[in-house]
Amino acid sequence: MKNKKYSGVVVPMVTPFTNRGEVDLKGVGNLIEHVASNNCHPFILGTTGEALSISLKMKMDYLKKAIEVNKGRGILYAGIASMCLEDSVEMAKLFFDEGVDVVVAHLPCYYKISDDSIRRYFIELADRINGPLILYNISATTHMSIPISVIDKLSRHPNIVGLKDSERNEERMLTLLKKFSNDQSFSYQLGWAAQSLEFLKNGGDGIVPSTGNAFPQLYYRLYQAIQKGDYQKAGEIQQLTDKITEIYQKDKLLSESLPGLKVILECLGLCEANALAPCFELSESQVRDIQIALKALKIDNK
């Protein structure tokens, strides 16, 4: 089957910061180049990018640099999630005007809302933006799950082109695969890196692994291996990427694992390990543990 437009390896990018809390444009350039040159698609200003902690001006600085470096390469995804619908609509307009290919949005997280309100929220957003929208389900931060029945209804909207689902629920994943794997007008991407092999093997369109910031080439090789039916090779890569991810994620809150990922990126010379509140830099002992564990894996980052 022909790959859908929104498929492959989509890397949810970190946002590099200087020690003064400004967007580190050199780091942005390094990371976008690293991801794009390894045949992966950058997704900026999402959860991994600490997007809700960043001002609109900083987002635009990041966006413009990302567009410049990514030009002529993969699809550029950009998050427009906000607690204010008007802000999401405004960001979509600005981002599309600058040249972003597709925008991504999750639910606001301060009210628990009904299934019908979830549907109405995304319909209003999709109606008011001038380009393609991917739904983003991440119950870990929004504390709500977009029901599959609602996704099914939303998938028929002409501006809603796909779903990025980061909910760690195998039954849900398999149900969504059965529903959308053969739907050429709607892409299903998974933000649960540990299930990359099983997801792609069963017809998933794309994976969205945060560890791809550091090692995009591994996830692209995994994707290629599955496309060729080489599940043994894909399994070996899956095991390696799981070990890397464990270094900074095991027994950590999301607010701790994101700075941990940046420590790995600093070890690789891609950007500094600075974060914005409510994420904070790790202690010296935590940094040292990550450095030692990464070195022990002896990964060839080429």
Image: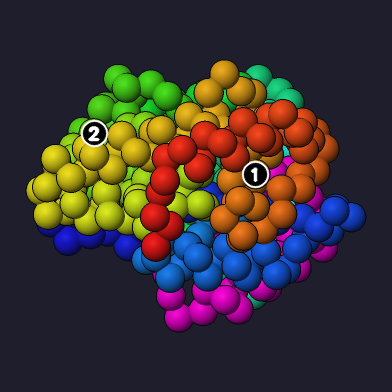
The answer to whether 180 is drawn above or below residue 146 in the figure is below
Residue at the extreme right of the image, as rendered: 20
Could you say where residue 47 lies in the image, as x and y percent from the top left?
62, 41
Could you say where residue 294 lies in the image, as x and y percent from the top left?
51, 40
Place residue 25 in its image quadrant: bottom right
Whether residue 92 is visible here, answered yes or no, is no
Which amino acid does the dot numbered 1 rest on?
Val
Q: Which mark is residue 32?
A: none
The answer to whether 13 is drawn above or below residue 275 in the figure is below
Residue 136 located left or right of residue 82: left
Mark 2 crowd level (few <14, some 14–19, many ≥20, 10 Å Cα): some
CB under 8 Å between discs 1 and 2? no
Residue located beneath label 1 in the image: 263
Nearest the viewer among 180 and 261 is 261
Could you say where residue 76 lies in the image, as x and y percent from the top left?
51, 65
Q: Which mark is residue 198?
A: 2
Whether residue 28 is visible here, answered yes or no, is yes
